[in-house]
Image (cartoon, grey):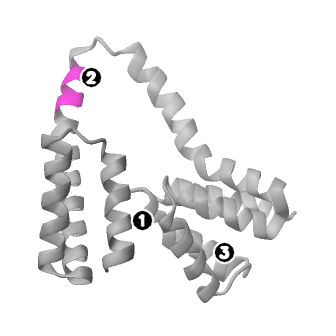
Amino acid sequence: MIYWQLFLASFIPGILGYGGGPASIPLVENEVVKRYEWMTVQEFGEVLAIANSLPGPIAPKLAGYIGYEVGGVFGSIISVFASVAPSLILMLLLGSILYKYKNSAKVQRLTLFVQPVIAILLGVMAWQFFKESYVGIGFWQTILIAGISYWLIEKWKVHPAFVIFAAIVYGGFML
């Protein structure tokens, strides 16, 4: 029964969490803290902090940890699968439909209409990161890190992963 509960606790936020990880975090918390009472709010907050510090999507990381804590390795496997299953199913269905009609003028126009929306969303996300950084470390530190990062990536063609690592090291020692 615990494995079925783990499956539901990860699958339901995956279906209802429209908008990705940030939208699904409150849904996961509701399942884990309020519905099944596997963790306290404090414990969930600590798990969320750890999961945010690791690379990759937040929902499978939360699911993997919670599943392991509640049901061991098998619970972790079930939870991770359940967290990605809704996206996987939709991608297979929608991908096959889009592949079937990939040469259709309507599908190609749809792609053209989606591109500016994605650009706007990325711009909004970048602005939010800038605001959070400004509040957290100050204006001049933010400008310094952003300027050096831009220079390294655009002028010197340094891989972004190395720039991110260097910013983490700088933040760890200087901030």
Q: Compare residues 24 and 68 and report the one nearer the observer.
A: 68
Q: Quadrant of the N terminus?
A: bottom right
Q: Which residue is found at the position 60% from the left and 64% from the top?
A: 62
Relative vertical location of residue 113 with respect to residue 135 in this rendering, above or below: above
**What separation in Å lies between label 3 and label 1 (alpha carbons)?**
16 Å
Q: Which residue is found at the position 74% from the left and 78% from the top?
A: 38
Q: Amino acid at mark 3?
A: Val
Looking at the rendered structure, which numbered label has been put on residue 64? none
Q: Residues within 10 Å of mark 3 (few under 14, many from 20)?
A: many
Assign a secondary structure to mark 2. Answer: helix
Relative vertical location of residue 36 with respect to residue 11 in this rendering, above or below: below
Residue 156, by quadrant, is top left
In the rendered image, which residue does mark 2 sit on?
107
Q: Which residue is found at the position 63% from the left and 55% from the top?
A: 11
Q: Residues within 10 Å of mark 2 (few under 14, many from 20)?
A: some
**What separation in Å lies between label 2 and label 3 (alpha carbons)?**
40 Å
Q: Amino acid at mark 2?
A: Val
Looking at the rendered structure, which numbered label has been put on residue 32? 3
Q: Nearer the viewer, mark 1 or mark 2?
A: 1
Relative vertical location of residue 17 with respect to residue 82 in this rendering, above or below: below
In the rendered image, which residue does mark 1 sit on?
22
Assign a secondary structure to mark 3. Answer: helix
Pick whichever of labels 3 and 1 is earlier in the sequence. Answer: 1
- Judged left or right of residue 153, residue 54 is right
Q: Which residues are magenta?
A: 106-112
Assign a secondary structure to mark 1. Answer: helix
**What separation in Å lies between label 1 and label 2 (alpha carbons)?**
29 Å
